[in-house]
Image: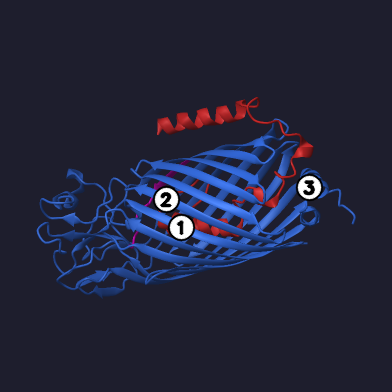
Chain colours: A red, B blue
Amino acid sequence: MKKLVLISCCGLLIFTGSGCVFERVKPWEREVLAREDMQLEASSLDELSNEKIFFSKEASKGGQSLGGGGCGCN
Amino acid sequence: MQLKAQTSMRHRLSVATACLLSMDGSLALAESLADWQFEASYMRYAEANRITVNESIIAAKRELDNESIRGTIIYDSMSGASPNGAVPPSDSTQTYTSPSGSIFQVAPDELPADEFKDRRTAFSLAWSVPVMRTVQASLSGLYSTETDYLSYGSEASLAWDINTRLTTLVTALSANWDTSKPIGGIPTGFTPGSNTDRYREDNKFIMDWMVGVKQVINRRSYLQLNYGFGKASGYLSDPYKVISFVSGATGEPIGARGYYFEKRPDSRTQQNLYLRLVSHINDTTYQLAYRYYEDDWGVRSHTFHGKFIISLTPKHVLEPALRHYRQQAANFYHYALYDGPGEGVLMKDVVNASRGLSHASADYRLGELTTHTIGVKYLYRYKQGHIGLRINYLRQQDQRSLFTTVQAWISQVIFKLRF
């Protein structure tokens, strides 16, 4: 478990500190990033249903959102 | 058309750019003017010869400036036969008593499964508000009730945009207080199937925390990385699951009630790491995700998920998706308990838990298994929303081929309207 915490911290630091590696996209160049199909859709209804199905049928949870819970299905 | 200056300024600036530069301008502009958003779906999950779930969801969201409130109502009806964890007998008829008090018999070569019917209703309310120019906070509450289960939950999250909004830092914390109250009561773990002693209910507390970052890579792509930590404590066993007590020589259940009620640890610590790449190339958005999960029950899993959002035209969208999941078994998962040398665990350790085996479960969902899911969603987009249908096929296999493969069809109709 400590290895997973260490890997996660390194990943987060690399992400946040890598401004020189990623392209500096100007605000007027973000039309593609603003598309509806590019948004994070953790709260969309089919994602909610999927999250519950996999939480009920498997022993894992979490990922895109906190996920799981609220039922006696696992 | 007059813009409403008060609503979601940040979002309006981005879609205004889309209006000027994109063929999808009319759809994006309609989205920017909406104050209300209404969603509904009906989902049917059906396993072959087992469980069927019908789920209806309604959600309404109101936006004002950068603040929003979203209410959701979920109604599930579940029925069918759920395997109780016992092994199919080959020679003799076995008798089981479920915690609901019903007695059922299982013929030779028949999979022991408990018939059930239940309803679940859940309500949630989420409030999102900017606390600083670049920080958005959200608070939500959940209430869920079933015949035999009750849950109260709450969640708080913060999203902080930095680096001219090319980077978003997210953190979220949730807590759930659950009560398991099966009809007929909860059996004490590791007591034999003939034991009729029960106690009324027991509680569980679950805490989850997540920290993550979303980073724009270029004009068309971004990466998301999340780390999640969770801790559960209290009654974590399944009151409906049993584990067979079988002869080491024949594999047959010993006696007419050859089983024990399962017992799981009363705490569980979990972690997961999630990485997702989202990229738009030509008319398709690609979403590729990977999740690693582990906990102190010994479960390890890897999940690969790919989704491809193909805009056939501005109004017609096709979304094929596939998912591969592989799980390593919990360290107290056993197919059965044996009374002598051979595959499995010696029965005497169960009779006196202080001398050895403390926990055991034959719930196949804790076993070594693989799940494959494949499907497609079709969306028709109109100016104020969309309507769609998705169909998925799920196949779950026990890697040791001891439990029957689970096959299920998932179909769902979804609807969204902004006004």
Q: Is residue A74 visible?
A: no
- Residue that label 3 marks: B18
**Residue B250 belongs to the span the image colors magenta:** no
Amino acid bearing label 1? Thr
Task: Provide the residue span drawn in magenta.
Answer: B229-240
**Chain letter of the residue beneath label 1 in the structure image:** B
Amino acid bearing label 3? Ala
Q: Nearer the viewer, residue B221 or B178?
A: B221
**Residue B233 belongs to the span the image colors magenta:** yes
- Residue that label 2 marks: B325
How far apart marks 1 and 3 lie (CA) works out to 34 Å
* Same-chain status of marks 2 and 3: yes
CB-based contact (under 8 Å), mark 1 and mark 2: yes
CB-based contact (under 8 Å), mark 2 and mark 3: no
Looking at the image, residue B376 sits to the left or right of residue B161; the answer is: left
Task: State the SS at label 2.
Answer: strand
> Which residue is painted at 50% across and 49% down in the image?
B305
How far apart marks 2 and 3 lie (CA) works out to 37 Å
Q: Quadrant of residue B133?
A: top right
- Dividing the image into 4 quarters, which one contains the C terminus of chain B? bottom right
- Residue that label 1 marks: B373
